[in-house]
Every structure is written in C-alpha cells, then in structure tokens.
Amino acid sequence: MTQAANSESHAAAPKQAMPSVIAQQAATLDRLPFSDTADFDDASRGFLGTLENAAITNAQGRVVWSLEAYGFLTEEKAPATVNPSLWRQSRLNMHHGLFEVVPGVYQVRGLDIANMTLIEGERGVIVVDTLTSIEGARAAMELYFQHRGRRPVTAVVFTHTHTDHWGGAHGVLDGETLARGEVPIVAPNLFMEYAVSENIIAGPAMLRRAQYQFGPFLAKGPRGQVDCGLGKSMAAGSVKLLRPSDLIMETGDKRVIDGVEFEFQMAPNSEAPAEMHFFVPRYRLLNLAENCTHNFHNLLPFRGADVRDALAWSKYLGEALQMWGGKADAMCGQHHWPVWGKQRIDTMIRQQRDLYKFAHDQTIRLMNHGLTATEIAETIKLPTSLEGAWHARGYYGHIRHNVKAIYQKYLGWYDANPVHLDPLPPVESGKKYVEYMGGAAAILERAAKDFANGEFRFVAQALSHLVFADPDNQAARALLADTFEQLGYAAESATWRNAYLFGAQELRQGMPKTPARPPMPRETLAALRTGQLWDVLGVRLNGPKAEGKHIVLNWSFTDTAENFVLTLENCALTYVEAAQASAADATFTLTRSTLDELIAKQASFPEAVAAGKIKFTGKAMSLAELMGLMDEFPRMFEIVEPKRTAVT
Ligand SMILES: [Zn+2]
C-alpha cells in the first residue's frame, strides 16, 4: 500500500477531490482570465529584501509568523483540491519583504496578514499601521532600517480600528518614546470606541468564530489552509492597544507630519466603523486603507461584526476618485500589493466603487421584489466587466454572502416567513427531521448517493440535522465531514474554504485543545475608558444567578478624578458616571491603574487592600458577591454539533 493510499484510508485524514469538484475547477480555469498576470508583476515590484520565509520569533524563540509551511504554493498549477482562482490569490499573497512603492515610500508585506506602510519625512519615518503583533512590528521596522538606514519614527498613523492595523504599535514606538509623548499617533475619529467595542465586548465569541474564518488550526497544504484572501493567516504574538493622540475628524482635514503633507478622507462604517483614506501630494501616493484591496472584501466577516455599509463604502470610493483621481502615481492599501499608473488606479477604484454599489443596489432590488437572502444569493451574478477583474473576486468576502449582509443591514435576521419566526433550535428540530425522514439509516443511504452526485449543499443540510439529533453517529459525522471538505475544495473564497475545512476537521477530530484564555494585557486595559470596563463586566453578568439581587457600589478613582455608581438590579448591571449613591452597599477608593491590575490578575483584591491601594467603607463583601455572579467565557464551544455543556 502506498503512502497516499494509506493516509486515504485513515478516516480522519483529508480526502481527494470528487469528480464534480474536479470538473468545477476546470471550468473556473476556462472562465477566468488567467493569462492576465499583471498582479504578479505588481506584487513583486520594488522588492528590496526580506527575512527567510518571513519567519518571526518572539523573545522565547516561539514562531509568531512564518510562511515556511506554505512552500507547496511554489507550484504554479492548482491541485484538484483548491479552486484555481483561490490558488492564484494564495500565490500572490506569498510575496513578502520590504518593497519600494515610490522613492520615499515603502511597504512591508507578507510579514503579517496586513501591510505596514513607511513614508519618509524630513527627520525620520512615518509608520502607517503597525501589524498585528509587537514582534511582527519590530521585525518589520528592523527590515526597513536594514535597507533604508536607521532613523526615528516621527509619527504613527492608524488607518482603522482592526487589530491587524494597530496591535503591534508598541513594537514601533518603545516605552521611553511613548512616555515622552512627542510622537503623534494619528487615527480616525472614534478610533478607541470601536477598537474596543468590535474586539472586546464580543471578543470571546468572535475569537472562536474567527478560527472558522482564518483556519489557524488547519494544517497548511493543498488539502488544508492555503490563504485567508486578505493575506496568508492570522499572526500570533503580543497585542497591545495604544491610544491615539490626534484624531482626524473631517474629510479634507490636512496635517503636515514630519514635513510631509497628508490630505485625509473619512470613511466611517465602511470596512471598519472608524476608517480613513489619505493622499500624500509630495509622493503622489494614494492610500485607501482597506477599502480598495485586491478582493471583494467582507460586508460581514464570519467572525461576526457590525454589518458594514456597502452603499457608504461605494460612495467613499467615488469621493476618493473625485478628490484625487488622476493625481496619484501609486495607490497602495493596507493589504495586498500596490497599483501604479493613473489609468490603472482610476480603473481599479471605479471597479471597486461599482462592485459595492452593484452588490448593494441589486440586493435591494431583488429584496424589493420579495426575494429572501438565500434566494438573492442564488440569483445575483456579477456583471461580466467585474467578473473578469481579479481584484473584484470574492477571496475574503464573496458576493454570495455579502448580499446576505446587505439584506441583514436593511431587514435584519427575519425573512418575514412566520415559519422562521420561532423554529425549534437545531437539536430539537434535528430529532424531528430525522424521525420524519425515516431515521438515520435512510438519511445516510440517500446522502451517500447525493454525495456521489456532487449535491454537497443539500447533503450538508440533511446530515447536519442527523448530527444535531445524534452527535455520536460516527457515519453521519464522517459523511458530513467529507461533504464539508468537498465544499471547501470547490470554494473560491478563502474564508469559505477555511470554514468548511475546519468544520470537517472538528467533526473528525473534535475541537482542538487550547490553553486557557490569558487575562487582558495591562496596556490594553489602560487604553480603555472606565465606562467601557463596566460594559465589559456587564456582559459577563449571569442573569439567572443574579435573580433578586440588588447591589449598589460607589467607585472613586483618585488618579482620573472619576466617580461611578455601579448598580445591579433586575439582573442587569448599569452605571452612572460622575455620581455617588448615598445608600451604597460599599464605597471603594482606588486608582484606575489598581483596577487594571486587578482585572489583569496581577494582584488580588485582598492583596491590594493589604497594600493600601484600595480603601473602602461599607460591606466589601458585596463586591465579592457581585464578582461571584460573573461568567468566565470558554475559549472553545461547539459549532458543527450540539453543545456538550448546557448554557443557561
Ligand atoms: Zn486588515
């Protein structure tokens, strides 16, 4: 028996592509303009140097980023188990290192999912976006210094609120520089509010769902993770939030930063709730942050987010064209590779503008004809002019799920058919479906036939009922896993592929074992407003446990001169700022940094009291009672099968 045949027979191993998938991949090769290879020239243009395999390690020697495992992507021809269009994008995203965009402007690409853009000024360098991790940012800066000479960082610009654009800030500016406070940190208005609300309040659910979006637990390979669409994968490493010092408020606002003029355009509620674009006249450089990249972006990523506004997104791109069309020699974004030449820049912005507008308008048109989200996804087809534009293809978002996001934005989760108003949840309905469909054996028999015929979408639906009815039915799990896998192999979108393949893996192997969630880092906590900390605490309150409880706590922070009343009643935790209750159960006087220490678990409450860091009057036990009502969120929870632990 050969090695391949041997692994094939192992139930938990990834399988080959089915004939229907192979035929679909061949059709994609015929349909799309693979002879247009301009993107490969652009992705390698201006290359100055790189790190071997783009490998980055932390102080303990642990690898936080490396492209070594993606070596299989040197093969030009896509294997049958990867959509050829996605294979092409995966190969483009392999370019890594330091690149010159125009003399004076550089980008570090492929050392993270996101890019760092470096703009040289009079005295030093302005760093636009700081990658996901401190380790990654440090490595990127070193690579830049190595090729361009060591010089001070004279400003940091955050284009938007997503972690891959600010997480590494402390690797760009050291503690001493930060303490001096002389380096401006420029960001769009409401940066802190959204960096927090998008990543922290719903963080536990989002992080688990993000595993399905990015596939970090999948082996990398032709039958595993190949890309994320936006870049290779999520970076590991240390992340710390840094508070901006200069907020850009309006379109048309200008700044002279280190002798270089920047013109800004606000783009709120586009790819991120707070985002901005800019033009640098000196370098004739346009940067559209993450709103004009080489894919159809996500209107609602699988990790979960506030749904994004496709109409606004399109308008910002139209406005950018109006403000700066014909002025730029180069356009770069904070993902993927730049585009050069006025004509090509204008074409790309116009096509991206129309991609979001088309998706928006046609979704609403079909919606107003009465089609539901799934029906719209089945009906809508991109116009030929956009179908053939590589940057418009759905490697990260996809027309078929972006239309559902647009539907959700306007009409919400309900399709107005009362059958969907109050359906039985998955386990209960699964049991009834299995009963109505004649039992497990009958379902499996039909599913196996349909699987062989390539009817993967319905086979997945039917078998999911069986797995929810009986998660220990190994045949059902195995066939559902095989089905997800074929759907993953066929998918053009990297996020679809990752979701399907990780679903298959969890059905075969169960959930990966992960270490417990570390407490929130001090620097991130310090960057949060106190009110935001109370909001984070509020969503941990276990409502049923709090039944009948009434607790009122006064808080007085000596360093920030803030006062709060925190009230638990009606199983809800609320706060009032700039107030103290006369009838509080207890009053605590402390510094905000002591509170941060407690939350970061660097000290316990009794230790802080003993050290004189907390003073209190009244019943201190009422705080312990309140904290006893708080849930700890699990890092992992079941997704493709029933919850093994009951949650109330
Ligand atoms: Zn990003």
Image: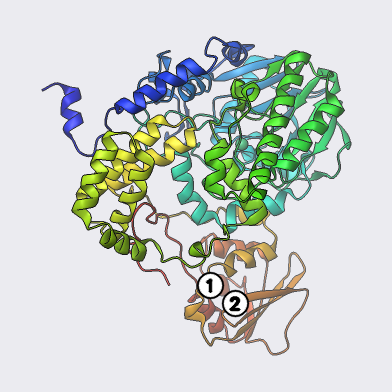
Question: In the image, which disc is placed on residue 541?
Answer: 1
Against 156, is 331 above or below? above
In the displayed image of the protein, which residue is found farthest to the front? 369
Residue 549 vs residue 137, the one in the foreground: 549
Residue at 34% over, 34% down: 486
Q: Is residue 577 left or right of residue 72?
A: right
Q: Is residue 384 left or right of residue 560?
A: left
Residue 413 vs residue 418, the one in the foreground: 418
Counting from the top left corner in percent of width and height, residue 207 is at: 49, 50
Against 155, is 144 above or below? above
Counting from the top left corner in percent of width and height, residue 230 is at: 56, 31
Residue at 30% over, 63% down: 431
Residue at 54% over, 9% down: 35
Mark 1 vs 2, N-terminal side: 1
Q: Quadrant of ligand 1?
A: top right
In the displayed image of the protein, which residue is found farthest to the left? 1
Circle 2 SS class: strand
Which amino acid does the dot numbered 2 rest on?
Ala
Quadrant showing the C terminus: bottom left
Question: In the image, which disc is placed on residue 51?
Answer: none
Q: Quadrant of residue 468?
A: bottom left
Mark 2 lies on residue: 572
Quadrant showing the N terminus: top left
How much space separates mark 1 and mark 2, taking CA atoms?
7 Å
Residue 225 vs residue 546, the one in the foreground: 225
Q: Is residue 323 visible to us here?
A: yes
Q: Is residue 149 visible to us here?
A: no
Circle 1 SS class: loop
Q: Is residue 121 left or right of residue 570?
A: right
Which amino acid does the dot numbered 1 rest on?
Leu
Disc 1 and disc 2 in contact, CB within 8 angstroms: yes
Counting from the top left corner in percent of width and height, residue 505 is at: 32, 42
